[in-house]
Image (cartoon, rainbow, N blue to C red):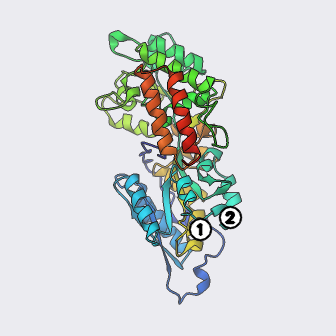
Amino acid sequence: MGNTRKRLRWVAPGVVLGIGSLVLSACGSSSPAQSTGSSSAPVVLQFWNTYNQTDTEASTIAKVVIPAFEKSHPGIKVVSDVYPTTETEMYSKLLASINAGDPPDIVRADISWVPGLAQEGALVPLSKDMSDFSSLSASVYPGTLAPNEWQGVYYGLPVDTNTQCLFWNKADFQAADLSGPPTTMSQLLSDAQKLTDPAKKQWGLGVDGTDLWNLLPYVWSAGGQVTNSSYTTASGYLDGTASVGELTALGNLFSNGEIGSDILGGTGVLTGEEGFPTGKYAMYIDGPWAVSTFSGGKPSLTYNKQYGIAQMPAGPGGSVSVIGGEDIVVPSGSKHAAAAEEFVQYMLSPTVQQEMAAAGQMSVLKDAGSFETKLQAYYAPFAEQLAQAQARPPVPNYAKIDSDVSNAISAALHHQGTMQQELDAVTPQVNQLLSGS
């Protein structure tokens, strides 16, 4: 999923940008609805989304962002339909509405949905239909744009994003006589060994599962890949030397008791968000939402005093992390596609992106780091990491690929076969999924 398993839920205290500033940044061209004349009935756009209702995400959309859009586009009304349960449930309802010929006009979709919907012909090809697509796509982090592409055409635009960085406990590092966080992949592995203290029941590293969201930052930074750049084959990549080598190294740490039970997943394991603030994990990677989790938990941790947030350690592949977030798309059955595209453009305006950053959504704009850091200092390392973050394979069968690969890695950790054997066995399955089989 997009962020995938969690989203940032922080609200900046005292940050109010104001509706007036949003109106000024609404798209400059006259909307299609306005050209019909004031006597015409307004166009009503249905906007499906899963913005969080327990903080200010959903309310900011409904009370600030949409009213400002409607003020600058008097011929268009937008109705925010929030699905308070899960993105999976909204996806099922979206498919049903598309099949019935009555889809919403705009959808904030998980980044993993777009290729599959595009393959089915269910989305408007924005790179062909939107006159401003080129300038909008050039304004965002490249990694956030990638999941919107299918067979050379872009069917959406990123609307919010996130990534993972390395969290490290300063007291644990001092006790292990380590001066700071690891900057290389080899150092990460050796530090995990030094930071492990069985007497304290402390593991050097927490890894929250065998899924690609959690493991790709390690694999990519080590120079590995899941597929080739055109997403047509996994042979020589998933089962290649770099990918197998890094996953084997992590497996060895787990076998030696230097990675906790979180990597196996399942009921009763100690997750990174639980284990890091209680001193059980000295390091782990996570997203910016973890900061608010720590501050509300007991015992809580103080960023920059008790722990730090660093870039992913660099290896042959660089310092690479994973892109999460959501995209904004227009279903091909929308009755008001032109007006919907006006709203899509508006959602990527700098002031809307700032307003949503204040409500806890990291901006997709490449130059957003300055205003995000002003909102909260801990945004800075994540904004920096986003410039070096990549998307998971943007293919229709991604969910099945993720599941199959995760099961193969888990089997290796359970010593059912070596990492090489398990990845050799799953690679043909991944190739079939990449081909659409």
The alpha-carbon separation of the residues under discs 1 and 2 comes to 12 Å
Q: Report x, y in % for residue 362.
A: 52, 47
Residue for point 43% across, 57% down: 91
Q: Is residue 282 above or below residue 68?
A: above
User: Which residue is the site of mark 2?
Assistant: 128
Marking on residue 79: none
Q: Report x, y in % for residue 116.
A: 53, 54
The foreground one among 209 and 411 is 411
> In terms of sequence position, does the residue under pointer 1 or pointer 2 come before the other?
2
Q: Quadrant of residue 56?
A: bottom left
Identified by mark 2, the residue type is: Lys
**Residue 57 in view in this figure:** yes
The foreground one among 243 and 105 is 243
Q: Secondary structure at mark 1?
A: helix
Residue for point 48% across, 44% down: 399
User: Depth-wise, is mark 1 or mark 2 nearer the camera?
Assistant: 2
Identified by mark 1, the residue type is: Glu
The foreground one among 410 and 213 is 410
Q: Report x, y in % for residue 204.
A: 44, 18
Residue for point 59% across, 46% down: 435
User: Which residue is the site of mark 1?
Assistant: 341
Q: Report x, y in % for residue 164.
A: 51, 35
Q: Decide: few, some or many residues near mark 2? Use Cα within 10 Å; few <14, some 14-19, many ≥20.
A: few
Q: Quadrant of residue 136?
A: bottom right
Residue for point 62% across, 23% down: 241
The foreground one among 167 and 193 is 193
Q: Secondary structure at mark 2?
A: helix
**Residue 258 in view in this figure:** no
Q: Decide: few, some or many residues near mark 1? Use Cα within 10 Å; few <14, some 14-19, many ≥20.
A: many
